[in-house]
Image (cartoon, helix red, strand yellow):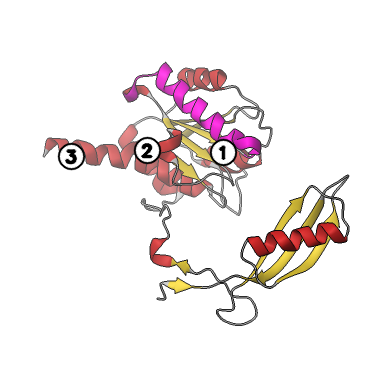
């Protein structure tokens, strides 16, 4: 496989790329010139304006098409690969029942001012997403969905009351990095409220999270766009049951 590649547009390796952005300018010739100047500074050369539309008072949305000289070095790309097996609902239920001998408790919420419950509902609610049932479908999982605009103290209190094994938080609102601030606040609150061996697994998800930031944000796992309930359920089994069992074996050895 090639280790160095360029974007593809009209012909292989031509570097053609499409970008979009908004400038705080009313739509006129000068605004279009400003957009092309910005595109040139971004490395698109030559840059072609393919779309411009005024978005309310004093703002214009642009789409620019052009060629970049930058190369992508695949051997330097760092991503979080799935490091656990993808289980069926039946397999998840069987492992939880046999190993935990009780229901696995999950508490989910959107915290802060975030009122977008589509993400958390897709993972937790019975209906699920993309043909997959949500965690409520798993008979060996006890799921509590707190909904939207839950404060961090409310989330901690609910996790304590439910004796949660895992806390799932969805963050869609990202203005001024609200998702990062809320996540750090949440992880700090759980560290303060519970000793390490009593803390639930902390999992966050949303379209703007960087999956490599788990350590920086103080959480156990970050899931990005496209995550399915099955992936989350499989991870819960892996982190709460399989990994714990492996650690015990290692200590015993």
As measured in the structure, the alpha-carbon distance from the residue carrying label 3 to the one carrying label 1 is 32 Å
Which-is-in-front pick, marks 3 and 2? 3
Q: Farthest residue in the left direction? A: 253
> Which mark, residue 249?
3
Residue 28, relative to residue 101: is it above or below? below
Residue at image point 51% right, 17% down: 157
Q: What element carries label 2?
A: helix
Mark 1 or mark 2: name the one nearer the start of the chain.
2
> Which mark, residue 183?
none
* In the foreground, 226 or 140: 226
Residue 62, relative to residue 97: is it above or below? below
Residue 111, relative to residue 17: is it above or below? above
Specify the segment rendered in magenta: 172-196
Residue at image point 42% right, 66% down: 74
As measured in the structure, the alpha-carbon distance from the residue carrying label 3 to the one carrying label 2 is 19 Å
Question: Which residue corresponds to mark 2?
Answer: 96
Mark 3 or mark 1: name the one nearer the start of the chain.
1
Which image quarter: residue 43? bottom right
Magenta-span inclusion, residue 195: yes
Name the side, left or right, on which 37 lies relative to 214.
Answer: right
* In the foreground, 177 or 245: 177
Mark 3 or mark 2: name the one nearer the start of the chain.
2
Magenta-span inclusion, residue 191: yes
Residue 143, relative to residue 207: is it above or below? above
**Residue 170: percent from the left, percent from the top?**
57, 37
> Which mark, residue 124?
1
Which image quarter: residue 154? top right
Q: Is mark 1 on a helix, strand or loop?
A: helix
The answer to the question of whether label 3 and label 2 lie on touching residues, with beta carbons closer than 8 A, is no
């Amino acid at each position: 496989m090639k280790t160095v590649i360029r974007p593809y547009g009209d012909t292989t390796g031509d570097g053609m790329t499409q970008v979009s952005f908004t400038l705080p300018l009313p739509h006129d010739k000068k605004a279009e010139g400003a957009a092309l100047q910005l595109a040139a500074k971004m490395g698109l050369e030559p840059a072609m304006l393919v779309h411009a539309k005024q978005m309310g008072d004093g703002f214009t949305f642009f789409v620019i098409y052009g060629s970049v000289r930058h190369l992508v070095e695949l051997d330097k790309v760092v991503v979080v690969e799935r490091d656990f097996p993808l289980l069926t609902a039946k397999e998840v239920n069987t492992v939880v029942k046999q190993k935990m001998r009780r229901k696995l408790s999950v508490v989910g919420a959107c915290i802060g001012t975030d009122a977008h419950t589509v993400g958390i509902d897709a993972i937790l609610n019975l209906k699920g997403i993309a043909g997959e049932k949500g965690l409520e479908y798993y008979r060996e999982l006890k799921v509590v969905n707190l909904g939207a605009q839950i404060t961090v103290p409310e989330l901690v209190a609910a996790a304590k009351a439910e004796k949660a094994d895992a806390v799932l938080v969805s963050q869609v609102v990202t203005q001024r990095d609200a998702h990062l601030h809320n996540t750090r606040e949440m992880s700090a609150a759980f560290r303060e409220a519970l000793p390490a061996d009593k803390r639930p697994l902390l999992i966050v998800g949303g379209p703007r999270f960087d999956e490599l930031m788990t350590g920086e944000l103080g959480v156990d796992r970050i899931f990005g766009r496209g995550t399915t309930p099955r992936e989350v359920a499989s991870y819960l089994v892996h982190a709460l049951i399989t990994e714990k069992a492996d650690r015990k074996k290692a200590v015993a050895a």
